[in-house]
Amino acid sequence: MASKLLARILVRKCLQVALLAALLSQPAQAGKLPDLVIPEGVGINIHFTRGNEKDLDLIAAAGIRVVRTDLKWDETERYKGVYDWSAYDELAANLAKRGIRPLFILDYSNPLYEETKHKLWLNIWSYYEVMSPRSPTSIAAFARWAVAAEQHFRKYDVIWEIWNEPNIKFWKPAPAVAEYTRLAMATCQAIHAANPNATVIGPASSGIPWDFLEYLFKAGALSCLDAVSVHPYRNSIPESAGGDYIRLRKLVDQYTPANHKEKIPILSGEWGYATVLLGRPQIEQANFVVRMQLFNMLYGIPLSVWYDWKNDGTDRRKHEHNFGVVQTDLAPKSSYVALKTLTTQLSGFKLVMRLNLGKSDDYALLFMNAAGQGKIVAWTIGRPHKTRIAGPPAPRPTKMTLTTWEGFKSDFQLDGAWIPVSLSQSPIYISP
């Protein structure tokens, strides 16, 4: 009786999957955010513009489809009304050659339009700090610059992000949600007035600052933004973000204008883990770079940007030196290998559902492609152990293939109608 019930359930799931496969075959529209298909929403941060083509080759080889970087106001407008995009022209063209979409962060301030303040550090070092755009003049100039950037780079289908982490030190002289809101709304409205099909996101907040976000949403920002980007950094595992995503989804839905036909997406715009000495080993970063992508997809996050591409230095004790998936000399870390395995194994596959393995710590995600082929990705956040997953409906394959995070493959037999697996904190890929 139990086997017949299982068979009926599997048949229903197959019908659902057939519908999803039909949807998968529809091409994505320009100007939209990625669908929940690997590797369209796999992103990474970089810190360069010119050259570095070997970096870009490795990024493309890893299956990464979105690159996020700063487009700095003061570097591209050194004289009022005169814009120099040459460094970003080179980067955008190099990304396009490799099928990578740019995510340009519109930041930071410009001394041509905003006041500067003298700073003194320990009475021995002085410097000038440019205030973030607060006056009507500087806000209008920032919006004009942003529109000029959108018009110049329109053919590259850029995702435009307004500022970076305005709720912490990157807003000068101190975080001020009202000031950021005025800038964000003026800039977003100006870009959409110039190009209604442009993709504009924000606020790229550090963490998920509830009061900051609610003020921004109450002020009407969701009437313009195409997605809400947050940086869900945490010391705990990626799977601990579920409660935050549920709460944020409710908050976004609460303030979404009634005339919106679809839900406003939430994006994981920056998130990573550093491989510091006496801290996280490379294998843990490798596990997290994959699990972050998969877990975010489970919560409907269409774009997840990993921080960072390359280590910023060689000091193993400093966090900022060790977020990369490659070393300073471009030698791949374990996380690069794991990310490449993810995009290779699931290229063209869309998330269908999480399978119930009977334990909340165990994850098994079913993916399907347009041809109706299925794959399962499985891991646990608990201790390693053996379990089994319901196999595909009859006629069943005689063998299944298991692929490890390194890309090593092995064949195994089904146990009747079941797939026997050994789960660990490193995701594995299971396919007929």
Image (tube, rainbow, N blue to C red):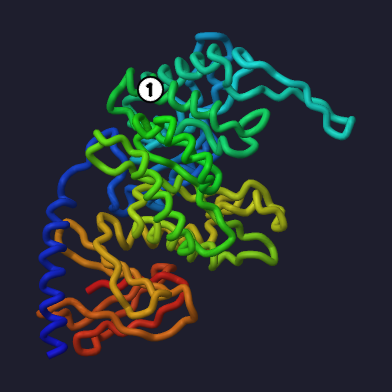
Residue at 14 percent across and 80 percent down: it is 396
- Left or right: 139 as drawn, with respect to 117: left
The answer to whether residue 175 is above or below residue 2 is: above
- Left or right: 36 as drawn, with respect to 271: left
Where residue 60 sits: x, y (%)? 40, 47
Q: Nearer the viewer, residue 428 or 49?
A: 428
The answer to whether residue 50 is above or below residue 25 is: above
Q: Which of 210 and 332 is in front in this view?
A: 210
The answer to whether residue 261 is above or below residue 8 is: above
Where residue 148 sits: x, y (%)? 42, 17
Q: Quadrant of the rendered structure where residue 114 is? A: top right
Q: Quadrant of the N terminus?
A: bottom left
Residue at 30 percent across and 75 percent down: it is 356
Crowd tier of the residue under label 1, counting other residues whose Cα lies within 10 Å: few below 14, some 14–19, many 20 or above: some
Asked if residue 373 can be seen in this view, the reply is yes
Where residue 138 sits: x, y (%)? 55, 15
Q: Quadrant of the rendered structure where residue 340 is? A: bottom left
Q: In which quarter of the image is the C terminus?
A: bottom left
Where residue 312 sits: x, y (%)? 63, 46
Residue ID for mark 1: 189
Residue at 48 percent across and 57 percent down: it is 336
Amino acid type of the residue that numbered disc 1 sits on in the rendered structure: Gln
